[in-house]
Amino acid sequence: MSDETVRLIEKTADDLFAAESETARAALAEGAWPERLWQTFAETGLAQAALPEEAGGAGVVAGLAVLRAAGRHAAPIPVAETMVGTLLCHAASIEAPAGPLSVHALPDGAGVGGVTTLPRVPWARFVSTVVVAAPGEGLASCKPVDIGEGANLAGEPRDDVTLAGPPDRFVSCPPEVDGFALMALARAAQLRGAMEHVLAMSVGYAQDRVQFGRPLARFQAIQHYLAEIAGEAAATGAAVDAAPQAGTPFAFAAAKSRASQAAGTVARLAHQVHGAIGYTAEHDLHIWTKRLWAWRDECGNEAHWWQVLGAETARGGGAALWPTMVAASGSAVEEAASGGAVEEAASGSAVEEAASGSAAVEEGGSP
Amino acid sequence: MTGFDFPPPAMPAGTDALRAEVRAFLADSQAALGWRPDSDFGSDWSASFSRSLGARGWIGMCWPKQYGGRERSALERYVVIEELLAAGAPVYAHWVADRQSGPLLLRFGGEEQRQAILPRIAAGECYFAIGMSEPDSGSDLASVRTRAERTADGWRIDGTKVWTSNAHRSQYMIALCRTGPAGESRHEGLSQFLIDLEADGVRVSPIVNLAGKHDFNECVFEDVTVPADRLIGQEGDGWRQVTGELALERSGPERILSTFHLFAVLVERAGPSPEPQLAEAIGRLTAELYALRAMSLAVAGQLEKGEFPEVEAAIVKDMGTRFEAEVVETLRRAVPLEPVAGGSANAPSLEAALGATVLGLPSFTLRGGTNEILRSIIARGLGVR
């Protein structure tokens, strides 16, 4: 998919979310489903953006661009969940249920077992279907029979769901298509968008607010805070942007952990720049900083993903560290003609896993 | 939109083969020349390594063939240099000439100098020092006082440069000198000159650093005469040229990989299945390096397209150098040991390697623009200041 197409899709999403999100947030705060925002979103086909071209989408890069825009405007509908649910159904060769979706994806090593309750399912009270993705078992579509309403720090629904019985009738899904990692990447893209907005608000505030006879932006300490926010947002963006090209589980883990790590720093410094007004309910800053604080802990926080990455890195050993880093970024290395260390490294388990993951995600919809 | 994007560049075809070629070369070279993997550019000065690299066509590799280059892309060069740094190869001798002095001469130098000097750089036998800082000009580079006065047939240079790495073992310096009034912007009246460090009137004396090493020098110029064609670029364009040069100096893999050797040591020491806490620490470094590498590569892609990503480069160096320090902090917490002085970063004992790196770290966030200057550049890029 060309850069131009992706830009157009992002622009469409950006315009839509910019126009509708504020009203929609007010509706959600009153307990109502933001129907108009959802309808416009659904009509434009943006929920299918992440699907491969042959399935009517524009690829993962386009999907991430939509999620970035959703984060930038704090769009209060299940953009990530519907997009990932749609992608998972496509990977499992089943038709995605109509309407908004939620996803309950389990991390590697966790089984669904005989559970009949699912904790903190995003948007559950408003969706038609919860797509349950369990490693090794595949996908199951579940209809909730009872819902205990809850929310994250930003007031987005996170409900405890009771099912009629344990999820059964699993449809097999390619084992490499990891729903938990896909949700993590999607949240990372939303975090990235939210950070961009927080940066823009902070720069704007620093330019407008005058103290000691000059704008805050003239104070070096403030300039350096803004630079640090920009750096954290940029590192998050780079890690998210690199993920589709790499297509490896390693890359998804790096993206979410970097995003979660950045979120805390960005929120802290943005509040420091804004002073007391930013701590009020009246000022909009909290709409985004609460999302940063909520999303960083969802779909695996940075410690979770660091452990995943660290375990994989350690498995390869010191000699394989560099080849692993390079392979994880999606540029596989041909075996060197000579040099024992290099050959050993290139055939190490981490590299092989990364390479197989790359093939897998292409199948799952990488452009 | 506020903020900066680092779009992943499309790597040229054959990149993987080139990478494999470099790795094979390094394995052979290590056996033949007996170097040990090192941190921080491989701080060993090895002219023989530089010459062997030049023979492979991996110095000045993006330059036109007529000047000894190979006309490869900036991204291919990126692949080569990141492999060299990750392997801890002794690239120090030719580094400055390859990275910034050569490209500067190629862009702004006189034809005679280009023909005379660039092929020697590319062969790995001609080395450069950077003449920017002075006793009263550190971060405030616009305040340089070294003067170049016009003479009948050239220029006469007087002044003092400090913190000049490797002036005692390089053939040339490119010096930023004052040739006219600073003007209101303070950026006018500066020009760059190519100075032969063997010339009469040049006095180079060591400034030993806190680790006891001799990299820095003080270079005093007393009535040093240089021919007219040693002015690089246009008279008065020095500030613009220097800024461009510094952008090249800020975003490369050398700003994220200076302590990579110790990261590999940490992973090796941790063993194949470390405790969760150590795995987490390793994972944190892994994620950071992954993101930084993506950013650094993106800047290389922007440079390749002829863009001038000054702010993006500043972000890479600010964050990259802090990551380099974090590697050391993580290692010393994870593998309790006491660093010892007097070794080098490639010392066989980890205590000595760690000691040398701990003593080297303060320079990482100073050289090529302090992190505070970098953050001011980033802030300006955000539209504030």
Image (cartoon, rainbow, N blue to C red):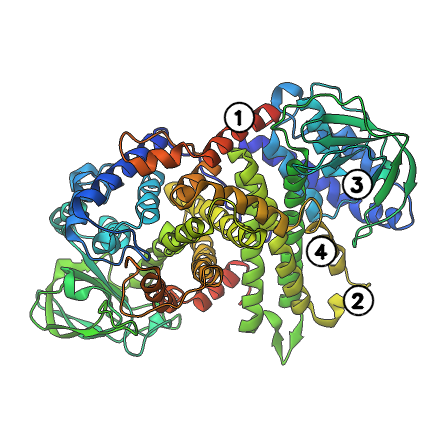
Instruction: Check disc 3 and give the amino acid type.
Output: Ile
The CA span between labels 4 and 3 is 18 Å
Instruction: Check disc 2 and give the amino acid type.
Output: Thr
Q: Which one is in front, A363 or B28?
A: B28
- Same chain for marks 4 and 3? yes
Residue matched to label 2: A280
Spot occupied by residue B167 in the image (x, y as percentages of width and height): 18, 65
Q: Which chain letter matches label 4?
A: A
Residue matched to label 1: A359
The CA span between labels 1 and 4 is 34 Å
Give the mark, 1 or 4, whose residue is nearer the N terminus. Answer: 4
Residue matched to label 4: A293
Spot occupied by residue A344 in the image (x, y as percentages of width and height): 36, 35
The answer to whether the residues at label 1 and label 2 have Cβ atoms under 8 Å apart is no
- Same chain for marks 2 and 3? yes
Q: Which chain letter matches label 3?
A: A
Give the side of residue A280 with respect to residue B168, left or right.
right
- Whether B63 is drawn above or below A129: the answer is below
Residue matched to label 3: A77
Say which quarter of the image contains residue B151.
bottom left
Residue B38 seen in render: yes
Q: Which one is in front, B216 or B115?
A: B216
Spot occupied by residue B99 in the image (x, y as percentages of width and height): 28, 51
